[in-house]
Image (tube, rainbow, N blue to C red):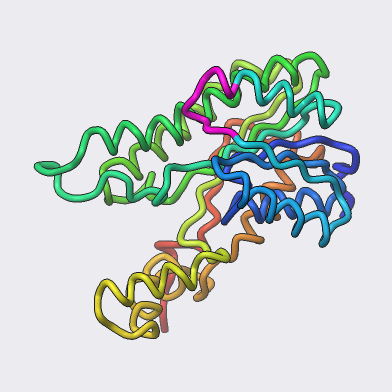
Amino acid sequence: MDFGLKGKHALVTGGSKGIGKAIAKELAREGVDVVIVSRTMSDLEASAREIEDETGTRVIPMVLDVTQTDRVNSVIPEAAQQLGGLHILVNSGSAPGGSASAVGPIETVNEDDLMSDFDVKYVGALRCARASIPLMKEQGYGRIINISGGNARNAGNLSGGARNVSMVHLTKTLSTQVGRFGITVNCIHPGTTRTERTPELIEARAAQLGIDIDQVEATDFAPGAARGNAICRMVDAAEIAYLTVFLASDKAWAVTGELIAANGGVGNAVYY
């Protein structure tokens, strides 16, 4: 299927690693010129070279800390200028450590960690959207895709779930404000997702618990990843990217303000 994305321009936060990198790569495969941003230039440059080599599409690395409003307000227009416009914003950035920033029982949870998580994920996405929407309004076209997480629907650590819920509200609210300007806003909830970092995370967890890697795969990474979902395997980051490409395309005009779970059917598994 031709998604009609060739010649479009995108900015992907958290684009140097994980799901963000997979999304940037898939957009590039569709002929989208992409700016990838994160905090570390060395990681950005390595990912940009890799994606360009695989796709033949232009990928520009730019350092951006989404907690710094002034930087967001300067980098996003600069990115649009280098690209020749901005059609697609993917908010995939998250705090280091992902949704585990504020862990533990309520009696001991660290408020600074919680607020830091919100500042990166929720307020960071708001900052980037706020800087991008005027550019999209000028051209009468835009796609904003927020990457959230399945903990919005589950009990868990006190910042990961809450910040993911906030992304849903941001998505719905923005969609009602900008739809008449030709801009759609949607949110994807991945579950446990296999990325290039998964082997590293499994090894670290095994070392922490003093157990074999196979045991970690069968326990920590099974709920919501394989045994806990309907497709009986871990979702790959590329599959999140495929959904993002669809939402970024002209094929998805009718979809806005929506939350789409991409977790392999967590909670829907029935074993016979």
Q: Position of residue 88 (x, y in %)?
A: 73, 34
* Quarter of the view holding residue 186: top right
* Left or right: 97 in relation to 56: left
For residue 116, side relative to residue 58 (left or right): left
Asked whether the viewer can see residue 187, the reply is: no
Magenta stretch holds residue 65: yes
Q: Position of residue 138 (x, y in %)?
A: 80, 14
Q: Residue at x 64, y 32 (%)?
A: 256
Instruction: Say which quadrant the N terminus sits in.
Output: bottom right
Residue 222, x across and y down, in percent: 39, 73
Image label count: 0
Which portion, as a residue range, is magenta?
A: 64-72
Height in image: 173 above or below 191? above
Give the answer, above or below, for where 266 lies relative to 95: below
In this rendering, the answer to whether 64 lies above or below 130 is below
Which quadrant: the C terminus?
Answer: bottom left
- Is residue 246 in view? yes
Q: Residue furthest left?
A: 107
- The answer to which of 238 and 153 lies nearer the viewer is 238
Rendered location of residue 136, percent (x, y)? 75, 21
**Relative to 43, residue 201 above or below:** below
Q: Viewer-proximal residue, 64 or 212?
A: 64
Q: What residue is drawn where x is 82% and y is 62%?
A: 54
Q: Would residue 61 appear left or right of 262 to someone viewing this image?
A: right
Q: Is residue 10 magenta?
A: no
Query: Residue 62: which quarter of the image?
Result: top right
Query: Which residue is at 71% across, 32% downward?
Result: 143
The residue sitting at 57% across, 56% down in the picture is: 18
